[in-house]
Image (cartoon, rainbow, N blue to C red):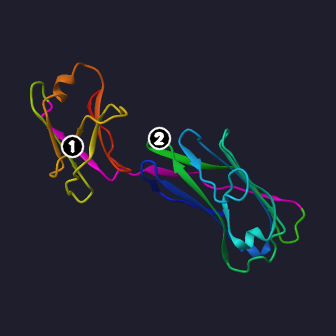
Amino acid sequence: MIAATDATVTEGGSFTTTLNIKNPKNLKKIYADFEYDVTKIEPVDMDSSTPGIQIALESWAKKGTIIANRVDEKNGRILISIDNLTNLSTADISKLGTITFKARPAFGDEAQIKLHLGAMIVGDNVLSQKFVLPDMKVSRDYPLIIKAVGLNPGETTTITVTDRNGQPVAGADIYLNELSYPFWQTAANGQVTTNILTQLLTGEPLSIRAKKDNLASKPLIIAE
């Protein structure tokens, strides 16, 4: 098995892990048990006609005997077990299925999908052989860039939000310390001017962050 996960995901966005099989015509049975952090990501159901949550299997894989295709949301496990796959695909490499995840609010900077246990029966072998996969990491994408000048006590602070190309972002909400509501919103020039921020420098941790739609910036640490 070969597995690949999207490198980045935006806040509240979705990403996929693709499972491929090399020389699938020789594969008789596949067993794969993945684990993930339930506080950071959640699998998306790809088969609404079946109770529970399932990954999206390719048509050739569906012709095999599906023993298990289920998600354990409580413990963060995804189990795939399919038998009788021999000669159902004759390609050199065939996609077995796709797992779609959604980033939770507590995603943080990165999440990992790990293979807990993998095994397969190939060709005429009776016994299964284990296989391993490298841990797959997806990182939070921060398309917005936030900067601030005028951070000394008594100064007027100018907060600027741009995209990766340096273009100003209008209508971006500015949050303090990850609070659930914004304090300011950028104007057409991507800026906010305020006298309040430096008054909050009381020795406590202080950070600001920009958000617009499902786009966000990294927190800018003002005081630690």
Q: Secondary structure at mark 1?
A: strand
Residue 35: x %, y % from top left: 65, 46
The magenta stretch is 127-151
Q: Residue at x 55, y 47 (%)?
A: 112
Rendered position, 64 above or below 137: below
Tell whether 221 sits left or right of 192. Answer: right
Q: Residue furthest top?
A: 202
Three-letter code for the amino acid on which mark 1 is drawn: Lys
Q: Secondary structure at mark 2?
A: loop
Rendered position, 123 above or below 187: below
| Corner quadrant of residue 124 | bottom right
Q: Residue at x 33, y 31 (%)?
A: 177
Q: Residue at x 17, y 23 (%)?
A: 199
Q: Which residue is denoted by mark 2 in the rendering?
A: 105
Q: Residues within 10 Å of mark 1 (few under 14, many from 20)?
A: some
Residue 12: x %, y % from top left: 46, 48
The magenta stretch spans residue 84: no
Instruction: Tell me the tag on residue 92.
Output: none
Q: Residues within 10 Å of mark 2 (few under 14, many from 20)?
A: few
Instruction: Tell me the tag on residue 147.
Output: 1
One can see residue 39 in this view: yes
Q: Residue furthest bottom?
A: 90
Camera-side mark, 2 or 1:
2
One can see residue 120 in this view: no
Count of marks, rendered view: 2
Which residue is more in the foreground, 85 or 2? 85
Tell whether 172 sits left or right of 51. Answer: left
Three-letter code for the amino acid on which mark 2 is drawn: Pro
Q: Residue at x 56, y 53 (%)?
A: 101
